[in-house]
Image (tube, helix red, strand yellow):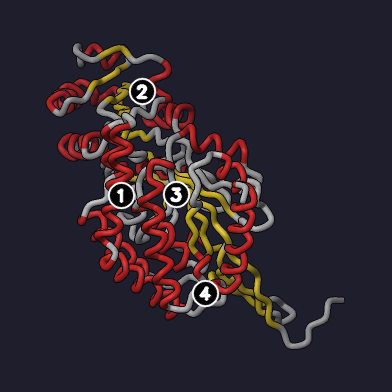
C-alpha cells in the first residue's frame, strides 16, 4: 500500500472512531484512561527495549545529546506517563456541558454546548511521552487522534501505540481512536496535511522549522506557536530581591524550553541599582548577556546585542538585556519583538500591573512570577497538548477544554419565525 493510501485509510478510520467517541459516556472514557495507565506498567519492559533501539540508532547517527535525552524513556518517564493519564482521568469532562445560556423574548432557550473537535492530527518530534499525553487528552475530550512522531522515535511510538490499543480494546472503545503513523517517510506528513475531509485540526509540536512547514503545507486548520520570545520587565517600583529570583528562575531553571525568558527589560530609573547584581548572579550560572549600550555601561563583561538578538529564541543560557525609559517603552519593545507567547512584569504598583495585564498581547501575561509558569500543568489544566499563540480557537496552554468547541443548542415550545 502506498504512503498516501495508508494515510487516507487511517484518516477515514479515525473519523469513524470519532463519531463513536463523541457520544461516549465519561465513565467509559475514564475507564479506558485508567486501563492505559495499567497497561503502561505492564508493558514497561517492552517499551524500554523498543526505546533502546531508537536511542542506539540516534546515538550512532550523531543526534545531539539534548535530543537523545528527550528521546530516552526510563522508569521515571513511564511513571510520569502513568501519573499524567490518571490525572487526565480525574479532570472534569467538558463534553456536553453548557458554557452559557440565555432566554430570548419569544421564549427560546439558547445555550452553547461543548462538543469534541472530531479528528486531530498531531505532528511532533523526539519525546515519546507526547504520544501518551496527546492520546489521553484527545480521548478525554472525545476526539480521535492520528499521531505522527519523529522518525527517530518510531520504535518507541509503535510500542506505546500497542499499549494504548490493548487498553482501548479491553474497555470497548474503537481501536482506531488512537493511531500512530507507522511510516518513516516524510511523505506521510504531506499526505496527512491533505486529509481535510476527515481531519479537523492539526497541532504541530517541535522546532520552528517543523511548525512553519506544517503551516505552509496544510489544508487543515493549524494551532501552533512558532517560538517563545518571552520577556520580563522590571518596573521602577520592583522589589529587587523578588525581581532577581523571578528573573533568575525564568532564564536558568530550564533554558531550553519555549517559556524560558529570552529578553530582560529594565526600567532606566532602577537599572544601576538592579542590573549589576542581577548580571553577576547570571554570570555565576553561566549565562551570556547580550546588552544594549546602557546595559554595557553597567555590565562591562556583557556582549553588545545585535538587532537579531531581540527577535531570538536562544533556548540556551543566553539572555538579551535592554534598559528602557518606562513601561510604555517596554510594552512597545514587546509588541515589536515578542512572539505572543509569555510576558511578565515585576512591580509593586497595582495600576501599572493592571495596565500591563490588559495591554500586553500574549497568550499568558504574569505579574511578579516567572515566565516558566506558562504550562498547562502549572496553571491547573492537567496535561497540555502544547501552547498556542494562534487566537482561533485557543490562545495559550491547550488542555482538555481547548480540545473541544461549542455548538448552539436551542429549545423551544412551538415558536415560529414571523
Which badge, 4 or 2, is on the more N-terminal residue?
4
Which badge, 4 or 1, is on the more N-terminal residue?
1
Q: Secondary structure at mark 4?
A: loop
Which residue is painted at 32% across and 56% down in the image? 377
- Whether residue 412 sits left or right of residue 162 in the image: it is right
In this rendered view, identify the residue nearer to me: 78 or 240.
Answer: 78
In this rendered view, identify the residue nearer to me: 91 or 277.
Answer: 91
Q: Position of residue 49 (x, y in %)?
A: 27, 53
Q: Mark 4: few, some, or many residues within 10 Å (few <14, many ≥20)?
A: some
Q: Is residue 347 visible?
A: no
Q: Position of residue 321 (x, y in %)?
A: 30, 23
Which residue does the numbered mark 1 point to in the structure image?
51
- Whether residue 238 sits left or right of residue 170 in the image: it is left
In this rendered view, identify the residue nearer to me: 137 or 125.
Answer: 125
In this rendered view, identify the residue nearer to me: 379 or 323.
Answer: 379
Which residue does the numbered mark 3 point to in the structure image?
396
Which residue does the numbered mark 4 point to in the structure image?
97
Q: Is residue 19 above or below residue 46?
A: below
Name the mark nearer the viewer: 4 or 1.
1
Q: Mark 2: few, some, or many residues within 10 Å (few <14, many ≥20)?
A: some
Q: Which mark is residue 325?
A: 2
Which badge, 2 or 3, is on the more N-terminal residue?
2
Which badge, 3 or 1, is on the more N-terminal residue?
1
Which residue is painted at 34% across and 65% down in the image? 85
Q: Is residue 65 above or below residue 104?
A: above
Amino acid at each position: 500500500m502506498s504512503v498516501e493510501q495508508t494515510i487516507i485509510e487511517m484518516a477515514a478510520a479515525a473519523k469513524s472512531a470519532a463519531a463513536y467517541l463523541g457520544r461516549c459516556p465519561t465513565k467509559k472514557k475514564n475507564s479506558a484512561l485508567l486501563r492505559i495507565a495499567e497497561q503502561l506498567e505492564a508493558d514497561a519492559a517492552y517499551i524500554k527495549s523498543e526505546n533502546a533501539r531508537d536511542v542506539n540508532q540516534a546515538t550512532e547517527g550523531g543526534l545531539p545529546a539534548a535530543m537523545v535525552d528527550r528521546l530516552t524513556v526510563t522508569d521515571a518517564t513511564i511513571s510520569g506517563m502513568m501519573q499524567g493519564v490518571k490525572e487526565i482521568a480525574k479532570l472534569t469532562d467538558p463534553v456536553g456541558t453548557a458554557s452559557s445560556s440565555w432566554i430570548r423574548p419569544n421564549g427560546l432557550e439558547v445555550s452553547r454546548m461543548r462538543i469534541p473537535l472530531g479528528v486531530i492530527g498531531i505532528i511532533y518530534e523526539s519525546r515519546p511521552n507526547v504520544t501518551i499525553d496527546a492520546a489521553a487528552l484527545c480521548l478525554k475530550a472525545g476526539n480521535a487522534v492520528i499521531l505522527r512522531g519523529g522518525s527517530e522515535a518510531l520504535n518507541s511510538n509503535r510500542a506505546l501505540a500497542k499499549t494504548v490499543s490493548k487498553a482501548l480494546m479491553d474497555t470497548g472503545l474503537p481501536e482506531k481512536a488512537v493511531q500512530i503513523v507507522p511510516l518513516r517517510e516524510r511523505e506521510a506528513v504531506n499526505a496527512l496535511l491533505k486529509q481535510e475531509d476527515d481531519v479537523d485540526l492539526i497541532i504541530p509540536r517541535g522546532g520552528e522549522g517543523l511548525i512553519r512547514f506544517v503551516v505552509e503545507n496544510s489544508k487543515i486548520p493549524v494551532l501552533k506557536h512558532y517560538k517563545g520570545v518571552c520577556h520580563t520587565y522590571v518596573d521602577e517600583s520592583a522589589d529587587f530581591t523578588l525581581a532577581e529570583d523571578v528573573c533568575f528562575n525564568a532564564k536558568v531553571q530550564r533554558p531550553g524550553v519555549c517559556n524560558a525568558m529570552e529578553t530582560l527589560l529594565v526600567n532606566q530609573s532602577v537599572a544601576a541599582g538592579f542590573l549589576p547584581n542581577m548580571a553577576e548572579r547570571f554570570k555565576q550560572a553561566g549565562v551570556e548577556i547580550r546588552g544594549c549600550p546602557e546595559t554595557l555601561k553597567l555590565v562591562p563583561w556583557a556582549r553588545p546585542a545585535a538587532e537579531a538578538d531581540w527577535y531570538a529564541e536562544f533556548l540556551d543560557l543566553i539572555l538579551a538585556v535592554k534598559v528602557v525609559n518606562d513601561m510604555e517603552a517596554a510594552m512597545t519593545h514587546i509588541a515589536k519583538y515578542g512572539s505572543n507567547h509569555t510576558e511578565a512584569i515585576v512591580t509593586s504598583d497595582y495600576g501599572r500591573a493592571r495596565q500591563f495585564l490588559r495591554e500586553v498581547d500574549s497568550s499568558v501575561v504574569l505579574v511578579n512570577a516567572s515566565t516558566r509558569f506558562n504550562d498547562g500543568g502549572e496553571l491547573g489544566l492537567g496535561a497540555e497538548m502544547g501552547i498556542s499563540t494562534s487566537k482561533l480557537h485557543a490562545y495559550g496552554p491547550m488542555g482538555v477544554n481547548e480540545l473541544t468547541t461549542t455548538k448552539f443548542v436551542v429549545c423551544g415550545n412551538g415558536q415560529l419565525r414571523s
